[in-house]
Amino acid sequence: MSGILNSSIGRKVAMALSAFFLMIFLLQHFAINILSVFSPDTFNEVSHFMGTFWVIQYVLQPVLIFGVVFHFVMGFILELKNTKSRQVSYAKNNGGANSSWMSRNMIWSGLAILAFIGLHFYDFWFPEINTKFIVGDMSGLIDPNTADSGFRYFEELQHKFHSHVRTIIYVIAFIFLALHLLHGFNSAFQSVGANNKYTKGLQGFGKVYAILIPLGFIFIAVFHHLKHVLS
Ligand code: HEM
């Protein structure tokens, strides 16, 4: 394994595979969170299932966290290696002439997403882990001592988007996510050697995904914020 990660192509393929994995996660994460707009009850039910089903909790979630950390660490390593080899190979590097702004700034859009994930974990993940594993309340209810207390997931989510500042930070992060995905999707396909009659179609799909998913997340954040402001 370390042999594969020591070669340049091995690192690129590993980076691409972790990117595909995270893109699948993003799609399911969007599918669940958009329910909070259209059907709060379904959102609550699905969140409770996701938060208590052991396969998701103890198998998929650790794999996901590993995938996120791996992607960021590999991203930094690739960036460092690229910077070193650029210094050696090109006396004059006219970046704008042969690469897009997005491809040259993947490290910056990646860092913006990393900062967002820090805030996002503080907002949603740590409170969830705290409630379940420190307080010891696995019920998912607002007040487990009251018979008719509903699930807390939707209430908690809505509450996070009361703040103007947090909503703006989320929207900016989703714009960086779109920029990162716009280059990342095609780059990941190139790294795994996908070059055939489907390439054009995949590139088109990549563009649509990179724009629609972040736009969808923006819609969720702005929807809950406006609902609060206008009520
Ligand atoms: C408006 C948009 C979003 C909302 C409302 C939202 C909501 C949530 C919620 C409620 C959780 C806690 C799930 C749990 O109980 O553990 C969560 C976790 C998480 N979110 Fe988001 N999320 C959004 C966008 C994003 C984006 C764009 C990313 C990635 C760039 C992301 C990455 C994660 C990760 C890695 C976790 C922890 C893993 C998990 O528990 O599923 N989220 N999010």
Image (cartoon, rainbow, N blue to C red):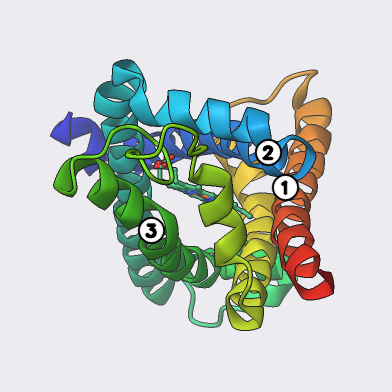
Q: How crowded is mark 3: few (under 14 residues within 10 Å), some or many (20 or more)?
A: few
Q: Residue at x 65, y 62 (%)?
A: 174
Tell which tag, 1 or 3, sits nearer the viewer: 3
Whether 51 is drawn above or below 15: the answer is above
Say which residue appears at 65% left-offset and 72% top-offset. 167
Residue under label 2, please give it: 40
What amino acid type is highlighted by mark number 3? Phe
Camera-side residue: 118 or 40? Answer: 40
Q: Which quarter of the figure has residue 185?
A: top right
In the picture of the structure, the residue carrying the numbered disc 1 is: 210
Q: Which mark sits nearer the N-terminus, 2 or 1?
A: 2
Badge 3 is on which residue? 121
Quarter of the rendering containing residue 92: bottom right
Residue type (three-letter) at the residue carrying disc 1: Ala
| Along the viewing direction, whichever of 1 and 18 lies nearer the viewer | 18
Where residue 99 appears, as percent x and y from the top left, is: 68, 64
- Pointer 2 and pointer 1: residues touching (CB < 8 Å)? no
